[in-house]
Image: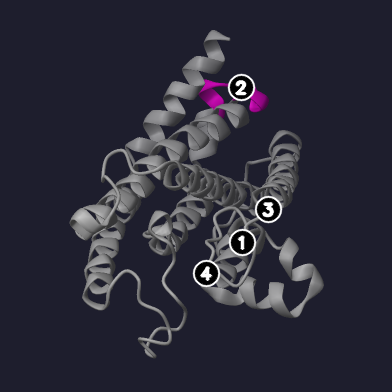
């Protein structure tokens, strides 16, 4: 247990001391809330109760007050998937993994420490970023919005769903990156889905709803979205994707040689 905790501490330090971590953190904690603030001010100009009949420039009606701000969460999701894929594949670059295994020979403990450290970092960053985004949104609304600190029960519920979506999709990118030892594969698989391909396939193809990003969308779908809010189905489908990817990467990590050109 002591060796596992020591390996976990090392992996936490390794993630949090990397330039990539700080770049992604700045994007999701600073830039995403800033974009949400700009969007909130634009909503105020047309009115929070605006409809497509009163404002033809709107693609769809604005959501109820509790759901404002969550449309900006997709921006940070892209950055988190990039972070997951690059961290998952990063150990295979420049022979870093060989040095890690010299310090801790148990591949099982190394993999568990890496996965646990990544989950902890992602969960903390996701909660901080999404809460800041929703808080800034309602702060921009002033008296017309929710209390920017306490928010509402529905808002907190959807913050939890959004954090879960970020964590699972980032962990999926992490697992695929470790499995293929390359960050391009998880990014090529997930990024097109984030940019509307997942929703398009879910609408046009029966099995499209079982793609990871489309399943994740079910977690925090608002009343004005084109797909229903079904967190149980979305969470189960997305969790299966994550378990398969992580089990496959664990098997490859513990059974295959990591030496040579990688």
Against 126, residue 124 (above or below) is: above
Q: SS of the residue at dot 3?
A: helix
Q: In this figure, which residue is indicated by the disc labeled 4?
A: 224
Nearer mark to the viewer, of 1 and 3: 3
Residues in magenta, as a range: 101-109
Question: Who is closer to the viewer here, 16 or 202?
Answer: 202
Whole-number angstrom distance, CA of label 4 to CA of label 1: 18 Å
Whole-number angstrom distance, CA of label 4 to CA of label 3: 18 Å
Q: In this figure, which residue is indicated by the disc labeled 1?
A: 213
Nearer mark to the viewer, of 2 and 3: 3
- The image position of residue 171, as x and y in percent, is 58, 45
User: In the image, what residue occupies the spot 35% across and 76% down?
Assistant: 50
User: In the image, what residue occupies the spot 50% across and 21% down?
Assistant: 7
Nearer mark to the viewer, of 4 and 3: 4
Q: Earlier in the sequence, mark 2 or mark 3?
A: 2
| Residue density around tag 1, few if under 14, some if 14–19, many if 20 or more, within 10 Å | many
Tag on residue 105?
Answer: 2
Quadrant of the frame with the N terminus: top right
Q: SS of the residue at dot 2?
A: loop
Q: In this figure, which residue is indicated by the disc labeled 3?
A: 234
Q: Earlier in the sequence, mark 4 or mark 1?
A: 1
């Amino acid at each position: 247990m002591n060796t596992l905790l020591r390996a976990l501490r090392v992996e936490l330090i390794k993630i949090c001391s990397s330039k990539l971590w700080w770049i992604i953190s700045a994007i999701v904690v600073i830039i995403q809330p800033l974009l949400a603030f700009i969007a909130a001010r634009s909503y105020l100009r047309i009115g929070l109760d605006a409809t497509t009949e009163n404002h033809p420039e709107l693609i769809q009606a604005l959501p109820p007050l509790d759901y404002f701000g969550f449309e900006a969460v997709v921006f940070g999701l892209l950055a988190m998937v990039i972070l997951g894929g690059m961290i998952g594949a990063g150990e295979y670059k420049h022979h870093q993994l060989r040095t890690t295994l010299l310090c801790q020979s148990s591949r099982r403990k190394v993999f568990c420490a890496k996965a646990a450290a990544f989950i902890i970092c992602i969960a903390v960053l996701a909660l901080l970023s999404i809460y800041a985004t929703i808080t800034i949104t309602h702060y921009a609304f002033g008296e017309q919005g929710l209390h920017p600190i306490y928010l509402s029960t529905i808002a907190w519920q959807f913050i939890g769903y959004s954090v879960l979506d970020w964590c699972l999709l980032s962990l999926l990118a992490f697992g695929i990156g470790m499995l293929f030892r390359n960050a391009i594969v998880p990014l090529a698989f997930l990024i097109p889905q984030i940019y509307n391909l997942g929703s398009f396939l879910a609408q046009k193809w029966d099995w499209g709803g079982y793609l990871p990003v489309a399943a994740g969308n079910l977690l925090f779908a608002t009343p004005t979205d084109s797909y229903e809010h079904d967190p149980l189905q979305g969470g189960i489908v997305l969790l299966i994707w994550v378990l398969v990817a992580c089990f496959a990467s664990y098997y490859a990590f513990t059974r295959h040689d990591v030496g040579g050109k990688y």
